[in-house]
Image (spheres, rainbow, N blue to C red):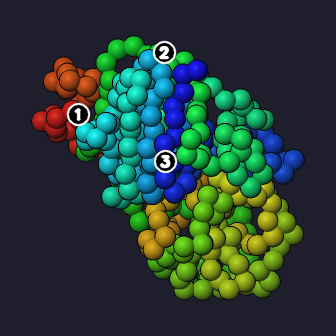
Amino acid sequence: MAALLVVDPGPLATLQDLGRVGYQRFGVTVSGALDERALRLANRLAGNEAGEAAIEFTLAGGTYAVEAAACRIAVAGGDFPLSINGRRAGAYASHTLKRGDRLAIGRAQSGTRGYLAVAGGFDLPRVLGSRSTHVRSGLGGMDGQPLKAGSRLPLADAERFDGPDRWLKTSLWPKARDVVRVVLGPQDDLFTEEGKTTFLSSAYRILSQSDRMGYRFEGPPIRHAADYNIVSDGIAPGSVQVIGSGQPIIMLADRQTTGGYAKIATVISADLPVLAQCRPGNAVRFRAVGVEEAEDLRAAMLDGIERLAAAFYRAGSAADDTANLLGVNLIDGIVSPEEAPPR
């Protein structure tokens, strides 16, 4: 069986795709990649559809060994150092490995989460339409649990790739930000004007009691207008609940489907990847935008990923692709054709 052997999974590694959609009315959590943008880029570098399941790792990536004649892999996300058989290798790049090769992904220099995609994807069953792992309910992924040392992830079609490896210039990697955009509501009328001003004008620090379910913050208290409890209703990705102490909690991929705290705002989906790369101790500020602008930013993010994918350099032939790159409007892009391809 062609497989990727987990030698060391690092602090937390799970299999994630774009999530389990359509079951929230039954109380089933969506789950899925916290940084959708990085997942999509890793898959596109590997030659997959953007939403294929990949390994999501946190703070450090661990070590993997190839048990197949050939296997193309790609890593994207935070700034994680990579090595293949002890030799430095580039992130935001695909690499074609052979049987026995070892990929080591070190501790992030910046950012928090990374994604390891393999060409052809992993041959694991979909549960309720998704391979995403939700550990609390034991759904999806590898027996519904984080990856463990010794786990073998079967490869669906290990040799299904053609053409040269590809890479994305460092200057075009997604940038970190400490400002996250939100749409106010759906219960912002349950907060005082002073409370809303406090929320939008203060810095909030991410606490260590944060995980894939939600980020807890500490900062100036946000004043409720009355009771902080509401009749439980649905929770969207990025919902900003404010608990009785006035501190915000932002609900993420592994959130529950309903909740009873008033929600002052929702982080726009285009900025959830930005938040996913923040780590405990980082300070974040919030800026309000309208619904229409949020929708435009979502469309721009998805369009930008596809534009980047269309402009990947072929490893070893960067000069040939310069004209192509110059012709594309890239995400936060600065073209520097002198940058050498990764080894």
Q: Is residue 19 left or right of residue 76?
A: right
Q: Residue at x 76, y 35 (%)?
A: 127
SS class, disc 3: strand
Q: Residue at x 53, y 82 (%)?
A: 219
Q: Nearer the viewer, residue 187 or 57?
A: 57
The part of the image, by quadrant, that contains residue 76 is top left
Q: Nearer the viewer, mark 3 or mark 1?
A: 3
The part of the image, by quadrant, that contains residue 111 is bottom left
Q: Earlier in the sequence, mark 3 or mark 1?
A: 3
Q: Earlier in the sequence, mark 3 or mark 2?
A: 3
Q: Nearer the viewer, residue 71 or 245?
A: 71
Q: Residue at x 49, y 76 (%)?
A: 205
The part of the image, by quadrant, that contains residue 156 is top right
Q: Residue at x 84, y 51 (%)?
A: 27
- Residue at mark 3: 8
Identify the image quadrant of the N terminus: top right
- Residue at mark 2: 160
Expressed as whole percent of the image width and height from the top left, the position of residue 325 reads 26, 29
Q: Nearer the viewer, mark 3 or mark 2?
A: 3
- Residue at mark 1: 343
Q: How far apart are the alpha carbons under marks 3 and 2?
A: 26 Å
Q: How far apart are the alpha carbons under marks 3 and 1?
A: 23 Å
Q: Nearer the viewer, residue 117 or 41?
A: 117
The mark tally for this picture is 3
